[in-house]
Each structure stands twice: as structure tokens, then as C-alpha cells.
Image (spheres, rainbow, N blue to C red):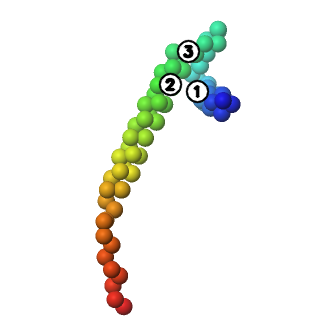
């Protein structure tokens, strides 16, 4: 569980450095923070889909037979 707290802190810190207010007066997550997290999740999902498609494509391109080595 502590890892999640560190990751939340790092995301909040980076957003604060960019000028995005991550919490309001009560300490609840602001709308900007929710939108930023949604964008990060969408980017991560897209990267995962691209990675899986590339890995599947490369796996399907592996030849079933290997030709014998050439004679010297």
C-alpha cells in the first residue's frame, strides 16, 4: 500500500509543478486532477494496446522451420 501513496504523491507533485491545482480547500480531489488522471490512464491503455499488438505481430512472424546452415 505505501507504493500507491508514493505514486499518488509523485503524480500530484508533477501536476502541481505544471500549475494544476490537485486539491481544493477541503482536501478532496479536484476536477482538474480527475481529468489529468483520466488522460494518463488513456495514454497508458493506448501504449499497452500498441505494445501488445507489436508483440503479437512479432511472435506471428517467427518462422516455423529454420533452414540448415550453409556449407563452408
Mark closer to the observer (3, 1): 3
Left or right: 64 with respect to 9? Answer: left
Image coordinates of residue 18 in percent, x first then y, are 58, 27
Sequence-first disc among 3 and 2:
3
Q: Residue furthest bottom?
A: 72
Viewer-nearest residue: 65 or 50: 65
Distance (Cα) linking label 1 and label 2: 8 Å
Distance (Cα) linking label 3 and label 2: 10 Å
| Residue matched to label 2 | 36
Which element carries disc 3, helix, strand or loop? loop
How many marks on residues? 3
Sequence-first disc among 1 and 2:
1
Image coordinates of residue 23 in percent, x first then y, are 61, 16
Image coordinates of residue 2 in percent, x first then y, are 69, 31
Q: Residues within 10 Å of mark 3 (few under 14, many from 20)?
A: some
Q: Residues within 10 Å of mark 2 (few under 14, many from 20)?
A: some
* Residue 68, picture quadrant: bottom left
Q: Which numbered dot is residue 39?
A: none
Q: Do the residues under discs 1 and 2 have CB atoms within 8 angstroms?
A: yes
Viewer-nearest residue: 54 or 29: 54
Which element carries disc 2, helix, strand or loop? helix
Q: Which numbered dot is residue 30?
A: 3
Sequence-first disc among 3 and 1:
1
Distance (Cα) linking label 3 and label 1: 12 Å
Residue drawn at the location 39% of the way across and 46% of the way down:
52
Q: Which quarter of the figure is the C terminus placed in?
A: bottom left
Q: Do the residues under discs 3 and 2 have CB atoms within 8 angstroms?
A: no
Q: Which quarter of the figure is the N terminus placed in?
A: top right
Q: Which numbered dot is residue 15?
A: 1
Any part of residue 10 in sight: no
In the rendered image of this protein, does residue 35 appear above or below residue 56? Answer: above
Amino acid at each position: 500500500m505505501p507504493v500507491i501513496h508514493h505514486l499518488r504523491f509523485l503524480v500530484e507533485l508533477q501536476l502541481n509543478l505544471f500549475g494544476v491545482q490537485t486539491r481544493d480547500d477541503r482536501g478532496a480531489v479536484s476536477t482538474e486532477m480527475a481529468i489529468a488522471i483520466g488522460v494518463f490512464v488513456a495514454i497508458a491503455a493506448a501504449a499497452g494496446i500498441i505494445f501488445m499488438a507489436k508483440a503479437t505481430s512479432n511472435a506471428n512472424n517467427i518462422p516455423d522451420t529454420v533452414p540448415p546452415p550453409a556449407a563452408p
